[in-house]
Image: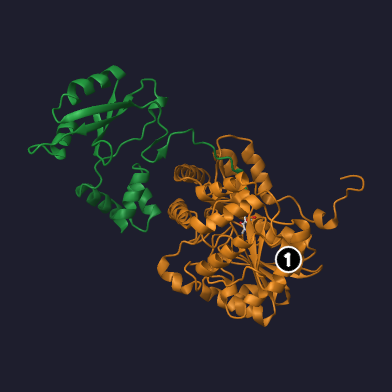
Amino acid sequence: MSEREVLELLRENARYDTADIARMTDLDEDEVADAIEALEAAGIVRGYQAVVDWDRLEDERVRAEVELNVTLDRETGYDDIAERLARFPQVKALRLISGDYDFDMEVEGDSIREVSRFISEKVAPVPEITQTVTHYVMASYKENGIELGDGEDDDRLSVSP
Amino acid sequence: MTGSLEPAERVQAVGPSGIRRFFEIAEERDDVISLGVGEPDFSAPWAARDAAIQSLERGKTSYTANRGMYDLREAISRYVGDRFGLEYGPDEEILVTAGASEAVDLAFRAFVDPGDTVAVAQPAYISYGPGVTFAGGEVLPVRTREEDDFRLTVEALETAGAETADLLVLCYPNNPTGAVMSRADLEPIAAFAREHDLAVLSDEIYAELTYDERDTAADASPGTATHASIATLPGMRERTIVCNGFSKAHAMTGLRLGYALGPGGAINAMNRVHQYGMLSAPTTAQYAALEALDSCGDDVEAMVDQYNRRRRFVISRFREIGMPCFEAKGAFYVFPEVPDGWDGIANEFAERLLRERGVAVVPGDVFGVGGEGHLRVSYATGLEELREALARIESFVDQHV
Ligand SMILES: Cc1ncc(COP(=O)(O)O)c(C=O)c1O
């Protein structure tokens, strides 16, 4: 299960290079490189991105979580609707979920106005969509498993027995 | 000290610890990456913390039984049985203490008479020597060697003259070397102890932190963990006190909870000292510990996985840098040698590394014989810091060697 181990390490930090991963596992560098290639080729690893704490940037991004309810007919399924929505660059994540609504959509834009406009002009008019509820993100505390707090609270003694 | 508060000779005999100086230098600057830390960088598992909080909310703020809460002793009994094949009953054979530190100290006070000789396998945790001195005993250092991966051998015991000792102190997995001993390694040591009628104090606080592949477990203890306890070997139970606690594997250093395991009579003797000196271990911590044993096994495993990655990373980096480093398989320390070509001593290496590059490590000398020329490097620190620290060490070595 070395691929699995490599995958776990990449999820922890995609910037670990093959040498670092080799040092942390029982694998040599070539095996690590092969494992990463295989993970990418199989479409398991789909990309690498930075986890950003937007609150720390001057030019804030506006993000919203949008609940979508849809009605299906004989010709249109969830996949069709999803495909249509996923194409918009403003949509950062789109998931079909169980519960009170059908899709959970993450939208990003430069301003509240831009995001609102996108939802009212591009999303709401989709005929199968019966309802949208938009929640603007006010603060983020954890993204992709990484806590965004100050973090530096290691209050251990610097040298101890 | 003036006036009548003149410290007793036994106290005067013990100087400040060699770690103290590095602590003071490290405190002077704020860019230090410390690999000198002997405790986990994780917090206690949330369930254990929550149990402590709940116990406070329910007003559980009284003393417990001297030996510790019965439920906790039962849980410890089950745990050490399942994990390490150690069989100790909750009524007579388990004593809950304020940290493994107290358990070790009680053992010295309960079993060492003035003038007794206590053989200590070194390099060793820094508290054993002073503990023996405070109890009026004398330390006989038994040197373990890097050639043996810092495992104790009968040859080392004989060279040191340990057959005349009254008590032998073992610590595996070891602080500072990270050495472990398999069941097979322990067998001749046990035979030596039986032959020369040595009592054994086995500090097994790092027992959960072993990184050997699971398939070697058959060679370890009869339990499920890869750690082997000398107390499980034939004829050893009656002459061994096992110390353990929640500081390391359960990341509960500040809660101060540990325990001693041994035959009823011996635990009774330790309890006699404990009941006057400590009364009982902290109640809040006992509730946390009970929960830790009940439900935090997965947390421990997750931490062990992290340590293992860091261990491999750190060992290979030291070897790349040209600092020989044996394959430490336990605790969260590695024990590399100062690099070939460095003409100074480890102490000086560590001090200059700290002053010039802001990386704190502990020179091996402070852990007794066998530690010379080595550094204790703790990997109880995040990988990012480890990467940076090793890069700084590399540049330091490139510049000076
Ligand atoms: C070998 C060894 N024994 C005992 C202790 C003390 O543990 P506790 O916090 O349980 O007193 C330590 C702590 O560093 C240790 O390394």
In the picture shown, does residue B91 fall above or below B346?
below
x then y, percent, for residue A6: 32, 52
Instruction: Please tell me which residue is depicted at 64% across the width and 59% down the height of the picture.
Output: B69
x then y, percent, for residue A92: 26, 32
In the picture shown, does residue B65 fall above or below B93?
above
Locate ligand 1 by image quadrant: bottom right
Instruction: Please tell me which residue is depicted at 24% across the width and 48% down the height of the picture.
Output: A44
Residue type at mark 1? Answer: Met
Q: Which element carries disc 1, helix, strand or loop?
A: helix
Residue lying farthest right? B3
Q: Using residue A79 as the reference point, say whether residue A157 is left or right of it.
A: right
Figure quadrant of residue B145: bottom right
Residue lying farthest top? A113
x then y, percent, for residue B334: 52, 56
Residue lying farthest left? A75
Q: Using residue B117 as the reference point, say whether residue B82 is left or right of it.
A: left
User: Relative to the observer, which residue lies in front, A100 or B197?
Assistant: A100
Colour displayed for chain B in the image of the structure? orange
Figure quadrant of residue B90: bottom right
The residue singled out by tag 1 in the image is B270
